[in-house]
């Protein structure tokens, strides 16, 4: 087992548009995406909608194949699957938690049937009684006990928080080593979120997994993860430890994100936002630095070339010529 | 799930009325032998009575004595029985009377019996066509919707072409080539012209479901494609598939009547459509023999009405946005 | 003494279902002073949207006001017949809805929708209405040349600003906003809130802002009301409620937001889920989830909202009359 659970280097993913009007155009969902997730670590991938973070998760989960760049999982570069057993082995290692607790469970299946699948697909249970024990085990790990209360229900009989726990139980059932969580609490009620987030932290401790935690919420990222990567318009803008990046943001976009995020504990007078404008379309992203149309410190050089994601020491990387 | 479907149909008042009308006809079809006074193609009543008791006569044909200890007698028994057969022919083209509540047609068949027995044929053709079309369109929709790519392009191409072709002329052409007997040709004609629309509908449903998170979750867990299609997607299509089945069956009943009326189907089979065909062929409409063409016409109209009424509930199923909260 | 803009007294409203009447708003009372920004916070199903719709008298289908009064402009809006309510709508009281894409007509340009709003309530010429529309668009930082744009041609943030312009075009005294920024990214959200603050200073209207995001509300509101299961459980100045919440539910809610800048500690949120409003618990509705529950809490009819400080009130047996 290598020290790095997951490594991306310069990954690119574009989705070509198919209609006649947009011939030749594509959605630049990911451009030069690079970051590292340490074994047993947690990395928050933070970005607003249209930043490309969900595509990144899909590419890592191999739901789509990247166009170019390297994807290294547990020290091994990812290669096209030659057969089903290779694909299964990968899926056992890398699992994805979906966002919507109402849509991620098939409404026509009972919970038992939903939770059995990962065990059956990967052949992890020998016999019915072993399967039953494993089902109970996983339900207990996500705090849904007694198991009898849940196994024979349908998803619509459970609350949003319970459904998300089932979703997470399903993800952990096959024993993955890397878990990609795509905004797992954003569709839950506020008071329920902490319960689910704490449970995820406990599961991480218990099972020794590495997390890639995708969110738009900086405070949530800080709570859950030790390292953070901020994405904007398909590119990574800043990487570092959460304390450093949030405490002392270097990239102008990260500063903007921080000043816009609610922080009632820091006193209730806020400075006005510096940048104007909105997130660019990924079909025709701005030339050069993608943030330059909104940046309060923009210089002519920013329009010409895309800045490199440079190492600035202390584990920090920033994509800005001003830093 | 199937139960939920029927619950939806029953809870809507309009569709409940439609269901009652349909239910009435289904009962008529099921109990046809008990309800109809005569079999459909019968044009006479034959009564045979025995006259008196049989008389037996015995006569000796020959006697022989081939040896001292052997006698051979050949004799014959003749039994005579007298029968009287009375044949009452039904009147031809008769007006309604005590014996024939709806009168008779050109061949002397009782029209009420034809109507009752014809219900069986009309409904079963409709149901068979519905079944055929639903299975075909479901298969095509699942394949093309889920697999996408070339399969989808090819299936969609054919579906679109068939959709654009005018139905009736197509039916006429197909009918001209079919030489089979019985009801199967009609089922085929209606089926082969009726599959494109449901296929499109079901395909778009498959596409919607394919993008739902639970399908993605299943794929990312490593589920096989066949499993995803049949265990994840298909169960969520039961309602809409049943709605399609209903709609197609009803349309087929009306379609069959149309085909028979213009003489394209098998006119030896007794169904509402053929009754109308023969009525028209024998000048019933011009001659004002309302008892001939009105009853089957009313039945067809009633079925059509029940279709429209049930459709109110079916629309709610296919388009959840129409559901009242 | 500050002038009262709106006074709600013992308002009850809900909707009829096959299983009975769901009282989504149960005996709710509060007062809004002129020019005040009042936030109403609560999770899904607490009745806050029903409350907003009841005040605007736009409850439909099976929803209706059951009892109570809504004092606005010297009249009881709860008991007025609809024809008498109509003239006040939009001219004195307006609403901004959650999803602009659903609230804006996709086949009309925004200019047409704005002038429609004007013509519906005022007798003005076309030119005058267009002038008002342009002035309003400028106030929300949208260029006048967008008058002929269609909703789908605008970004999410711009559409929401059009909604705000449409609501304010007749200069109402009261603006009710039902989760207007929930579907928007945090930066756009912040810019819209800044805009509303600016407009409030310029035009002097009062705001009722409904959301589930308490951390956001604390920063922008003057006064806060916390709703739970159809009742207001705590009410008072936003800052005080944040620094010293009295009701256990408010305390739990404040403990549901990870901190962005403060010390990193494990927070717990609230366990359990909200009660079914068809048959709520007889006593305090929060009792099943309350960490401080006592036998007195379970007795009917449950605690009422009593004053608990100079401008505060709280509905909890543990919080005395005066502090």
Image: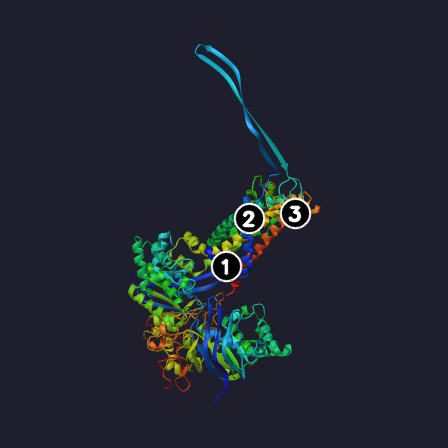
Q: Are marks 2 and 3 in contact (CB under 8 Å)?
A: no
**Label 1 vs label 3, nearer the camera:** 3
Give the number of the disc on residue B28.
2
Q: Chain of mark 3?
A: B
Chain-order first, disc 2 or disc 3: 2
Residue at the limit of the structure toward the top, as seen here: B68
Counting other residues with Cα less than 10 Å from the Cα at mark 1, is it few (<14), some (14-19), or many (20 or more)?
Answer: some
Per the rendering, the mark at residue B251 is: none
Tell me the tag on residue B8. 1
Q: Taking B25 as reference, is A188 left or right? A: left
Mark 1 element type: helix
The chain letter under disc 2 is B
- Give the spatial CA distance, label 1 vs label 3: 38 Å
Q: Position of residue C72 (x, y in %)?
A: 53, 82
* Residue C121 can be seen in this image: yes
User: In the current view of this chain or complex, which residue is farthest to the bottom?
Assistant: C1
**Position above or below: A79 against B59:** below
SS of the residue under disc 3: helix
CB within 8 Å, label 2 to label 1: no
Q: SS at mark 2? A: helix
Q: Using the image as rendered, state which of residue A257 and residue B117 is in the foreground.
A: B117
Which residue in the protein does label 3 denote?
B291
Task: Give the residue drawn at x 37%, y 55%.
Answer: A87
* Visible residue check, residue A268: no
Taking depth in this image into account, of A224 and C59 the one nearest to the observer is C59
């Amino acid at each position: 087992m290598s020290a790095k659970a997951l490594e991306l280097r310069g990954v690119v993913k574009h989705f070509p548009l198919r209609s006649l009007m947009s011939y030749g155009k594509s959605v630049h969902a990911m451009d030069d995406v690079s970051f590292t997730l340490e074994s047993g670590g947690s990395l928050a991938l933070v970005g607003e909608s249209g930043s490309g973070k969900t595509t990144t998760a899909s590419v890592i989960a191999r739901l789509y194949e990247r166009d170019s760049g390297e994807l290294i999982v547990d020290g091994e570069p990812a290669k096209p699957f030659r057969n089903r057993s290779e694909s299964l082995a990968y899926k056992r290692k890398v699992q994805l938690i979906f966002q919507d607790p109402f849509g991620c469970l098939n409404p026509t299946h009972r919970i038992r049937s939903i939770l059995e699948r990962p065990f059956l697909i990967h052949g992890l249970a020998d016999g019915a009684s072993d399967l039953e024990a494993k089902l109970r085990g996983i339900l207990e790990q996500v705090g849904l006990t007694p198991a009898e209360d849940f196994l024979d229900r349908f998803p619509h009989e459970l609350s949003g928080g319970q459904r998300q726990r089932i979703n997470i139980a399903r993800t952990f059932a096959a024993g993955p080593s890397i878990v990609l969580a795509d905004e797992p609490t954003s569709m839950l009620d506020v008071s329920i979120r902490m319960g689910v987030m704490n449970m995820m932290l406990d599961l991480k401790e218990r099972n020794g997994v590495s997390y890639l935690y995708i969110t738009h919420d900086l405070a949530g990222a800080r709570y859950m993860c030790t390292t953070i990567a901020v994405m904007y318009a398909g590119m990574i803008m800043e990487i570092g430890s959460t304390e450093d990046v949030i405490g002392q943001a270097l990239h102008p976009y990260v500063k903007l994100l921080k000043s816009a995020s609610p922080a009632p504990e820091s006193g209730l007078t806020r400075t006005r936002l510096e940048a104007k404008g909105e997130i660019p379309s990924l079909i025709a992203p701005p030339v050069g630095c993608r943030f330059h149309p909104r940046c309060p410190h923009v210089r002519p050089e920013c329009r010409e070339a895309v800045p490199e994601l440079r190492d600035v020491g202390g584990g920090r990387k920033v994509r800005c010529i001003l830093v | 799930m199937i139960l939920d479907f029927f619950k939806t149909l029953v809870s809507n008042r309009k569709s409940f009325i439609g269901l009652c009308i349909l239910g009435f006809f289904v009962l008529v079809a099921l109990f046809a032998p008990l309800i109809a006074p005569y079999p459909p193609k019968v044009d006479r009543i034959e009564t045979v009575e025995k006259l008196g008791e049989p008389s037996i006569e015995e006569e000796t044909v020959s006697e022989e004595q081939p040896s001292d200890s052997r006698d051979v007698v050949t004799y014959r028994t003749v039994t005579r029985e007298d029968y009287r057969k009375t044949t009452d022919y039904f009147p031809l083209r008769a007006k309604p009377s005590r014996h024939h509540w709806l009168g008779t047609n050109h061949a002397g068949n009782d029209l009420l019996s034809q109507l009752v027995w014809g219900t069986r044929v009309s409904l079963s053709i409709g149901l068979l066509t519905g079944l055929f079309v639903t299975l075909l369109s479901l298969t095509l929709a699942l394949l093309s919707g889920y697999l996408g790519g070339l399969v989808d392009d090819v299936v969609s191409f054919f579906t679109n072409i068939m959709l654009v072709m005018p139905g009736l002329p197509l039916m006429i052409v197909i009918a001209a080539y079919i030489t089979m007997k019985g009801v199967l040709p009609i089922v085929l004609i209606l089926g082969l012209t009726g599959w494109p629309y449901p296929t499109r509908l079901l395909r778009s449903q498959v596409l919607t479901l394919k993008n739902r998170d639970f399908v993605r979750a299943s794929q990312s867990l490593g589920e096989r494609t066949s499993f995803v299609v049949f265990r994840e997607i298909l169960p969520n299509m039961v309602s809409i598939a049943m709605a399609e089945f209903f709609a197609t069956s009803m349309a087929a009943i009306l379609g069959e009547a149309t085909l028979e009326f213009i003489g394209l189907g098998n006119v030896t089979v007794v169904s509402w459509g053929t009754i109308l065909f023969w009525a028209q062929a024998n000048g019933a409409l011009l001659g004002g023999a309302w008892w001939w063409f009105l009853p089957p016409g009313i039945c067809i109209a009633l079925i059509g009405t029940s279709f429209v009424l049930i459709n109110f509930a079916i629309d709610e199923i296919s388009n959840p946005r129409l559901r009242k909260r | 003494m500050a002038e009262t803009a709106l006074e709600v007294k013992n308002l009850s409203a809900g909707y009829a279902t096959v299983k009975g009447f769901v009282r989504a708003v149960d005996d709710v009372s509060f007062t809004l002073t002129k020019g005040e920004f009042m936030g109403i916070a609560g999770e899904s199903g607490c009745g806050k949207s029903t409350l907003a719709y009841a005040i605007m008298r736009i409850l439909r289908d099976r929803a209706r006001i059951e009892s109570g009064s809504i004092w606005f402009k010297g009249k009881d809006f709860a008991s007025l017949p609809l024809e008498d309510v109509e003239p006040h709508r939009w001219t004195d009281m307006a609403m901004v809805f959650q999803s602009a894409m659903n609230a804006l007509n996709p086949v009309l340009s925004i200019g047409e929708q704005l002038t429609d709003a004007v013509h519906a309530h005022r007798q003005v010429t076309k030119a005058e209405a267009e002038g008002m529309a342009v002035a309003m668009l400028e106030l929300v930082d949208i260029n006048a040349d967008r008058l002929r744009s269609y909703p789908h041609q605008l970004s999410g943030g711009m559409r929401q600003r059009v909604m705000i312009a449409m609501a304010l075009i007749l200069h109402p005294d009261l603006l009710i906003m039902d989760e207007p920024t929930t579907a928007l990214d945090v930066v756009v959200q912040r810019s819209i809130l800044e805009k509303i603050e600016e407009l409030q200073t310029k035009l002097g209207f009062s705001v009722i802002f409904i959301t589930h995001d308490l951390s956001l509300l604390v920063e922008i509101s003057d006064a806060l009301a916390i709703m739970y299961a159809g009742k207001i459980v705590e009410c008072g100045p936003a800052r005080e409620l944040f620094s010293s919440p009295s009701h256990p539910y408010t305390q739990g809610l404040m403990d549901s937001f990870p901190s962005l800048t403060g010390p990193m500690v494990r927070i717990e949120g609230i366990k359990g889920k909200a009660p079914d409003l068809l048959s709520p618990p007889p006593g305090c509705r929060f009792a099943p989830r309350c960490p401080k529950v006592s036998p007195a809490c379970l007795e009917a009819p449950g605690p009422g909202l009593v004053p608990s400080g100079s401008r505060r009130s709280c509905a909890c047996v543990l919080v005395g009359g005066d502090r």
